[in-house]
Amino acid sequence: MTEPGETPLPPARERILVAEDDDAMRDLLVGWLREAGYEVTACNSGLDLRQYLERSVLSEEVFEFDIVLSDIQMPLGSALDVLDAFFGCDGVPPTILITAFGDRRTHAAASELGAAVVLEKPFERSRLVEEIQRLRGRKVADASASLGPI
């Protein structure tokens, strides 16, 4: 609660960690998420994703990220490998996985390892923002009017 005479702090922007090895796709996702008002950190391999999560989840500091958005197939470790390494750890942010190579086994493995959502490429931007809003416990707005596919 704000004391009389104090200026309330603006709400913190939601922080998303994007892991995508394809430069064009990563740039597209990062640019779009920043335009939508999210604070975005990007990396391009499973190793980088693991290191960011180690700092965020395993340290005594405040968690760095609210959501993880990651391609499944990446060099130096897949997103499934990373989820497996953190399985059962407290503080792992909700994770949205994206893939161009999804099959039932991939979806089942992702679900078993705690992924909240698996999106198949290509997907609609509106679907991505709906999933982010749902995972953050916010009412899903009608974002489809101005958003096309990624």
Image (cartoon, rainbow, N blue to C red):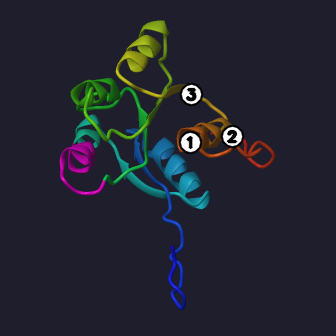
Image quadrant where one finds the C terminus: top right
| Mark 2 element type | helix
Residue behind mark 1: 132
| Mark 1 element type | helix
Q: CA distance from mark 1 to mark 2?
A: 10 Å
Mark 3 or 2, nearer chain start: 3
Name which residue type carries label 1: Ile
* Residue drawn at the location 67% of the way across and 35% of the way down: 124
Name which residue type carries label 3: Lys
Q: Magenta region, mostly helix, strand or loop? A: helix
- Which residues, given as a range, are shown in magenta? 51-62
Instruction: Decide which of 11, 124 is in the foreground and name it.
Output: 11
Q: Quadrant of residue 47?
A: top left
* Residue drawn at the location 19% of the way across and 44% of the way down: 58
Q: Is residue 58 magenta?
A: yes
Q: Which numbered mark, 1 or 2, is in the foreground of this view?
A: 1
Instruction: Judge from the rendering whether residue 117 lies leftward or rightward of residue 50; answer left or right.
Output: right
Rendered location of residue 54, percent (x, y): 21, 44
| Mark 3 element type | loop
Mark 1 or 2, nearer chain start: 2
Q: Quadrant of residue 4?
A: bottom right
Residue behind mark 2: 126
Instruction: Judge from the rendering whether residue 10 lies leftward or rightward of residue 18; answer left or right.
Output: right
Q: CA distance from mark 3 to mark 2?
A: 13 Å
Instruction: Judge from the rendering whether residue 106 lies leftward or rightward of residue 49; answer left or right.
Output: right
- In the rendered image, the residue lying farthest to the right is 145
Q: Is residue 54 magenta?
A: yes
Characterize the local packing of mark 3: few (<14), some (14-19) or many (20 or more) Cα atoms within 10 angstroms: some
Residue behind mark 3: 121
Mark 3 or 1, nearer chain start: 3
